[in-house]
Amino acid sequence: MLESLAESAGEAGEHVRDHLPKMLETFKVLLTESLERRAERNKRAGTDDFDEEEMQALEEEQEAEDDVFDQFAECVGSLLKSFHSAILPALEPLLGFIVPLLDKNRTPAERRIAICVFDDIFEHANDGGAALKYLDGFVVPCIAGCTDNDADVRQASVYGVGIMAEHCGQNFSPHVPSALTALASVIQAPGAREDENIYAFENAVAALGKMCEFQSSGLDANVILPSWLANLPITEDKVEARNVHAQLMRLLELNGSAIMGASFEHLPRVVSVLADVLPTSGLSAKLRLVEPDVAAKMKQFLVQMQTQIPQEALGKAWGVLSAEKQAALQAAMQG
């Protein structure tokens, strides 16, 4: 049932307004029943005669219950994208089911779902600061989740850090130091780029960029920006890749010296990143690492730097590229 409600919320948008009261009441009933079943399973697991076969059955039931909350989170996300902060008063009673799932003693799946719900709230419903009342209750478990053992919890958490950095303004400022530490632990962790960790890693890099752009007063951009640049490009999470590479061009326009360095010592890395992503602009919308309009800005930057940057620095920048990359970049610039 929740799956069909999620589709309705996503596809109908404003047209679902008339059905909101019934939809929200359905959510409440389904979540109440789900939590009751969870409590019953926990009670069964605590009995003396609970065996391995029953444990397997319980785990399967738990996965089914997690699906219920996943679908609820998807529904909430769709509603928030459609109605923004206007939907928050109606969602308030339902958040009472979600807040307890942020507790560190809940299962990884439960914590991930709760974090995703609040990620959506801060991303889509903070117009006029409407979501700020949830900040104190969310920011600590979200930052803690960045170092969780579960990769999915880490990904949702680092994404949330980036969202709060972008949308919460100075209200997030007191949390900048702990957020930077948490993001660094994800980015610098052994095996961070391995398959199971890559999405958490890339979302952490994206969040670090948002910290630089939106929380610059609380950090040393001359230190953090080069660190961020060193971990580009983003290649696996295509949505985040397009966002991050667009951000790179914004930051080059706003604070190019902090990224490239006073002596252009980081220019080789900038050129290397552009060489990796610019040729993908002609791919399909789902596969490209940069949007065509951003690709145009990259081309303009590469042209302008020929006359605005010392030849010695240019030579070093081009010198780090293989002959194949140089050819691909030249072709992309002319395309």
Image: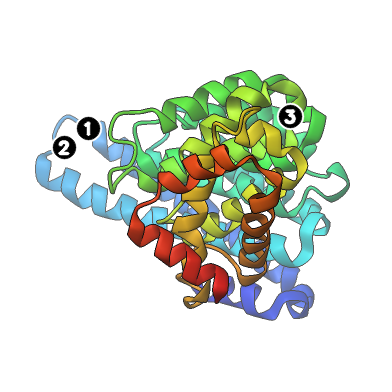
Q: Tag 2, which secondary structure? A: loop
Q: Tag 1, which secondary structure? A: loop
Q: Which mark is residue 102?
A: none
Amino acid at dot 2? Phe
Q: In this view, does 134 lie to the left or right of 112?
A: right
Label 1 belongs to which residue? 47
Label 2 belongs to which residue? 50
> Which residue is situated farthest in the front direction here?
311
Q: Nearer the viewer, residue 116 or 28?
A: 116
Amino acid at dot 3? Ser
Q: Which of 197 and 57 is in front in this view?
A: 197
Label 3 belongs to which residue? 216
Q: How crowded is mark 2: few (under 14 residues within 10 Å), some or many (20 or more)?
A: few
Vertical placement of 120 versus 71: above or below? above
Q: Would residue 39 be seen by someone viewing this image from the given angle?
A: no
Vertical placement of 133 versus 293: above or below? above
Vertical placement of 311 versus 225: above or below? below
Label 3 to label 2, Cα distance in Å? 54 Å
Task: Residue 187: give x, y in percent of width and height.
Answer: 43, 32
Task: Residue 129: give x, y in percent of width and height.
Answer: 84, 42
Q: Which residue is drawn at 57% across and 25% down?
A: 180
Q: Do the residues labelled 3 and 2 touch (CB within 8 Å)?
A: no
Q: Nearer the viewer, residue 139 or 23?
A: 139
Q: Do the residues labelled 2 and 1 touch (CB within 8 Å)?
A: yes
